[in-house]
Every structure is written in structure tokens, then in C-alpha cells.
């Protein structure tokens, strides 16, 4: 499902230059992975590389049959909308849309996705599961941070994607909501045989995942390879 080989990515022009070096990483279809490491170590960068939001300057990142580096921006965007569900740290909600229309946004962006009554029912069920059914008619400015985060999670899940990439999806939730949200992500991933990649600082949830990807261990593996 995910293959990274000899990846190098550097943010150009940054005040504090950062470069991610990743020799090798494979994530199988249906695998549930949690990605951990201190702030600034490259967790979010890796999530963006995996989902094709950014492209490595060298090396290769593959998602299924797609090699991100060989696709134009519009092609990568089309693949993301139809096959990848993403939860961003800043939620990336559109202020002029209601919570419901934000959840259904992928269906308004891609002609390959058909907005049917079944899809609307699925959005309602996800909203109920996340405890935001009462917010669906509100715009983001009338939602709390936690409610915005849950709208973003529902949007990531509504297309039943092949890959779920979630960057701190429980960062604004209380412990009970965080636990329920992790339950939902794992349940949905299992139902759809989807690959789940979750960036988190919450080490109490790591036992729920089949695999933990430690960014510091990946960096050390690269240093050892260089030294040898």
C-alpha cells in the first residue's frame, strides 16, 4: 500500500531548515500504524508525503499503484479526494459551508464521487457516532475546536477511503471523546480494509495499533546506514 525508498525532503527557504531523510518504510494494506516522535521531527511531513500533498525532492513514495512523484498536482489531488481520507491539525474546514457540507465536501469536489441518499445517510451516522449531529447546520465559526476536529474526522471517513491519514486527530478532544474517536477510526479501517496512519503525541493509545512508527528510530536507522 505505502512504499517509501531513499526519500529526501527539505523545506526550501524556511527560517529553520528541516530535512526529512527516510531510507525505507513499508506500510501494508489494512495495517493500523501510529506515528510518534517529538515536535519538529517530521511526523507531519511524513503524513503529507504519504498522502501526496508534498513530493520528495528525491527518492520514491508510492501509494498503491501510484508513484506520487510521477503525477501532476491535479492528478495527485484527484487521487486524494477519491481514495484518501485526511484529518489535518488545522482541520481545513471551509468557513462558508455548514458542518454537513464540510463533511460532504469530497463529493462536491470530484465528479468521480456521486452524492446519493446513501452517502447523506452515512454522513449522518458518522456525525451521530462522533456526537456532532446537533451541529450539522452550523458553520465552523460557531463550532468549538473539538467539534471542528470531529467534523474533519467525519469528512475523512465519509468516502470509505482506502487510506486514512490523521494528524493528531484527538488533540482537541477530552479523554472520553478521544477514546471513542480512536475506536471509530479503527472500526472504520477494519470495515473497509483501509490502511490507517495516525500521527499522535498520545502514547496511551499506542496499544490500540498494530504498529508504532517512531521517527527517532527511523532517523537513527538512517544515521547507522550512513555510518556503515
Image (cartoon, helix red, strand yellow):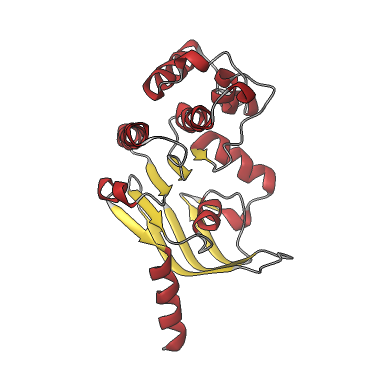
Q: Position of residue 226 (x, y in %)?
A: 47, 84
Q: Say whether residue 97 is left or right of residue 193.
A: right
Outermost right residue: 13
Q: Is residue 84 above or below residue 141?
A: below
Q: Is residue 169 above or below residue 102?
A: below
Residue toward you, 129 or 80 = 129
Q: Quadrant of residue 12?
A: bottom right
Is residue 112 something one can see in this rendering? no
- Looking at the rendered structure, the number of numbered marks drawn on it comes to 0
Is residue 177 something one can see in this rendering? yes
Residue toward you, 88 or 31 = 88
Q: Position of residue 128 (x, y in %)?
A: 40, 18
Q: Say whether residue 138 is left or right of residue 169.
A: right
Residue toward you, 1 or 166 = 166
Q: Quadrant of residue 78?
A: top right
Q: Is residue 25 above or below residue 178?
A: below
Q: Position of residue 113 (x, y in %)?
A: 55, 25
Q: Which residue is found at the position 69% from the left and 22% from the top?
A: 96
Q: Which residue is found at the position 47% from the left and 28% from the top?
A: 154
Q: Position of residue 158 (x, y in %)?
A: 47, 26
The quarter in which the C terminus is drawn is bottom left
Q: Is residue 88 above or below residue 143?
A: below
Q: Quadrant of residue 173?
A: top left
Residue toward you, 3 or 126 = 126
Outermost bottom residue: 228
Amino acid at each position: 500500500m505505502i512504499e517509501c525508498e531513499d526519500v529526501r525532503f527539505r523545506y526550501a527557504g524556511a527560517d529553520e531548515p528541516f530535512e526529512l531523510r527516510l531510507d525505507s518504510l513499508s506500510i501494508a494494506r489494512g495495517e493500523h500504524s501510529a506515528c510518534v516522535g517529538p515536535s519538529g521531527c517530521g511526523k507531519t511531513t511524513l503524513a503529507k508525503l504519504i498522502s501526496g500533498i508534498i513530493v520528495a525532492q528525491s527518492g520514491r513514495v508510492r501509494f498503491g499503484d501510484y508513484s506520487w512523484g510521477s503525477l501532476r498536482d491535479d492528478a495527485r489531488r484527484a487521487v486524494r479526494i477519491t481514495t484518501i481520507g485526511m484529518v489535518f491539525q488545522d482541520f481545513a474546514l471551509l468557513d462558508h459551508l455548514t458542518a454537513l457540507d464540510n463533511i460532504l465536501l469530497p463529493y462536491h469536489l470530484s465528479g468521480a464521487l456521486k452524492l446519493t441518499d446513501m452517502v447523506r445517510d452515512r454522513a449522518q451516522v458518522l456525525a451521530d457516532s462522533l456526537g456532532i449531529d446537533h451541529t450539522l447546520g452550523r458553520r465552523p465559526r460557531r463550532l468549538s475546536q473539538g467539534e471542528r476536529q470531529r467534523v474533519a474526522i467525519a469528512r475523512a471517513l465519509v468516502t470509505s477511503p482506502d487510506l486514512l491519514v490523521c494528524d493528531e486527530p484527538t488533540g482537541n478532544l477530552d479523554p472520553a471523546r478521544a477514546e471513542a474517536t480512536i475506536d471509530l477510526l479503527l472500526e472504520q479501517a477494519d470495515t473497509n480494509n483501509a490502511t490507517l496512519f495516525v500521527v499522535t503525541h498520545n502514547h496511551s493509545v499506542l496499544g490500540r495499533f498494530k504498529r508504532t512508527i517512531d521517527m527517532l528510530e527511523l532517523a537513527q536507522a538512517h544515521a547507522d546506514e550512513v555510518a556503515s
